Image (tube, rainbow, N blue to C red):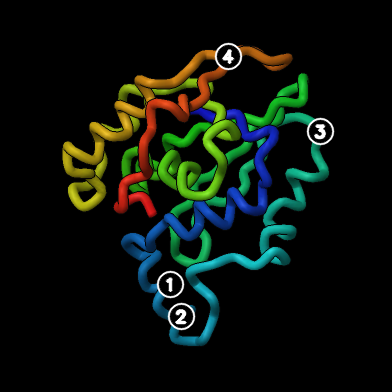
Amino acid sequence: MEFDITQLDKKLLIQTLFSHSAPVSLGQVEYYLRNKWGENVDGLTDKECEFILYEYNKLNTGIIKILDYHKGKPMKLTFYKKNNGRVIVDSSSYDERNGKYRFFEALLNIFLLDEIRIIKKGYRQYSMSNLQDHLLRPKEQEAIFKNILKNTIQKENEFGKYWTIDENQISYIPSFMQ
């Protein structure tokens, strides 16, 4: 999936995605060691986010790799700054390592529904094919995300077309997303 994150608070976005990520494979060792040494491994401070966003804030356009793995957690986060000022993120790499729709779930947990702007609703064909079993969602949960995406409204602004979530179609946020 692709999202227009131009208007989103980038620090809050990174902090939210980090808290929704879990350490995997060799990253688990780093995570547990850092935790044992007393480091905050489950959250990011504003200062850490300022450091992480340093390159992003310097460049006017281009591809900015924000985070790969951090404190043992897979982030795989890249921002695309367009010439027109739009900032896009593709959630596929994040979701491949954290679970299908996990990026979207993080957005739904923290941002207002009208702030979430979807550019592409689907995943690249191969991106979810190698998803590990422990990252697969029950069919009922996946159906909830598909239903939310089905009930979006297409809009357009100076950057182009996007979809936003129809608040009238969502009666509640399921407990597994909170």
Provide the residue designation for mark 1: 31
Q: Earlier in the sequence, mark 4 or mark 2?
A: 2
Query: Disc 3 versus disc 2: distance between alpha carbons?
Result: 36 Å
Tag 2 secondary structure = helix
Q: Could you tell me the amino acid type at mark 4? A: Lys
Provide the residue designation for mark 2: 35
Other-residue count near label 1 (Cα within 10 Å), few / some / many at <14 / 14–19 / ≥20? many
Query: Disc 3 versus disc 1: distance between alpha carbons?
Result: 33 Å
Which corner quadrant holds the N terminus? Answer: top left
Between marks 3 and 4 in the image, the one whose residue lies nearer the viewer: 4
Image coordinates of residue 8 in percent, x first then y, are 66, 40
Q: Are marks 3 and 2 in contact (CB under 8 Å)?
A: no
Image coordinates of residue 145 in percent, x first then y, are 32, 33
Provide the residue designation for mark 3: 60
Q: From this viewpoint, is residue 89 visible?
A: no
Query: Disc 1 versus disc 4: distance between alpha carbons?
Result: 41 Å
Identify the residue shown where x is 53% and y is 49%. 110
